[in-house]
Amino acid sequence: MLITTEELARHLGDPDCIVIDTRHDLADPAKGPRLYAEGHIPGAHFMHVDTDLSAPKTGTNGRHPLPDIDVFAAKLNERGVSPESQVVAYDDAGGGYALRLWWMLRWLGHEKVALLDGGYPLWVKEGRPVTKDVPPRRAGVFVPKPHLGDFVDVHYVERFAAAPTTKLIDARAAERFAGSQETIDPVAGHIPGAVNRFWKENLAADGRFKPAERLRSEYEPLLAGLAPGQVVHMCGSGVTACHNLFAMELAGLAGSKLYPGSWSEWCADPARAVARGPR
């Protein structure tokens, strides 16, 4: 699930190692491509969170709806992904964006995908090679085999968010969850019944993931006796929620689900209930 900078450096140039740069900025969608053009890990392809890892927005389907499977598969094939490929995703935000790609590949049946622990900042800090060269498009043979049980839709959340058999974990910052500060979506607050686990709490001070045993000790009290399969992860738009899902898997708590529409889809309908305050 995690690959170190040392391990990736040993595999640069390996045709079966596909590196994907997913750097992004919610407030500046052009920043990711700009940073990639200024320098990236040699051989890395770029995928944009808004246009490659998401479908077009309708105003009611959230800020980062899941893309059409065939369209996304075609983009993976352009980057040379095949069943034998080891995909490595990275960003400069502790995995906050790269893990969306990790989850999507797993959702479509590709298990050989890892996050670069420490990401691009650690790669640069260690003085590893950087290039402006863009790798040529390749012909991959990726065939999606979606796991439809890996995510839930808004109707599922409407029915079960507050049920004792479901734990809805919201990955947003505490201020956004509580509704005391909202800088992105038009409505502040959270879904009634949800609990808060800010995704950055999964990281140690150096920007790398906490050890698995520590993550497990932090998540088990949050689950309060429920099985991982009873957990649904959400955030603002189904991106950083993947960070908590990844952390649970890293901790040996596999089987939780993603709510891709998340808060941005939920709050688009004024008829849906909104809760405020910490929990």
Image (cartoon, grey):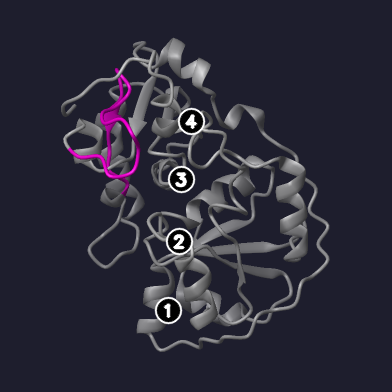
Asked if the magenta segment contains residue 186, the reply would be yes
User: Along the polypeptide, which appears first: circle 4 or circle 2?
Assistant: 2
Q: Which residue is mark 1?
A: 123
Quarter of the image containing the C terminus? top left
Q: Which residue type does callout 4 highlight?
A: Tyr
Quote the CA–CA distance across marks 2 and 3.
11 Å
| Secondary structure found at label 1 | helix
Quote the CA–CA distance across marks 4 and 1.
32 Å
- Name the chief secondary structure element in magenta: loop
Q: Position of residue 71 (x, y in %)?
A: 74, 47
| Secondary structure found at label 4 | loop
Asked whether residue 278 appears in the rendered view, the answer is yes
Residue 62 vertical placement versus 72 (above, below): above
- Image side of residue 278 versus residue 105, left or right: left
Callout in the foreground (1, 3): 3
Quote the CA–CA distance across marks 1 and 3.
23 Å
Contact between labelled residues 3 and 2, with CB atoms less than 8 Å apart: no
Q: Position of residue 271 (x, y in %)?
A: 39, 13
Callout in the foreground (4, 1): 4
Please give the name of the residue rendered at 59% of the width and 50% of the height, measured from the top-left corner: 53
**Residues in magenta?**
181-199
Name which quarter of the figure residue 188 lies in. Answer: top left
User: Along the polypeptide, which appears first: circle 1 or circle 2?
Assistant: 2
The 10 Å Cα crowd at callout 2, few under 14, some 14 to 19, many 20 or more, is: many
Asked if the magenta segment contains residue 9, the reply would be no
Q: Which residue is mark 2?
A: 24
Q: Which residue is mark 4?
A: 259
| Secondary structure found at label 3 | loop
Please give the name of the residue rendered at 52% of the width and 75% of the height, measured from the top-left corner: 36
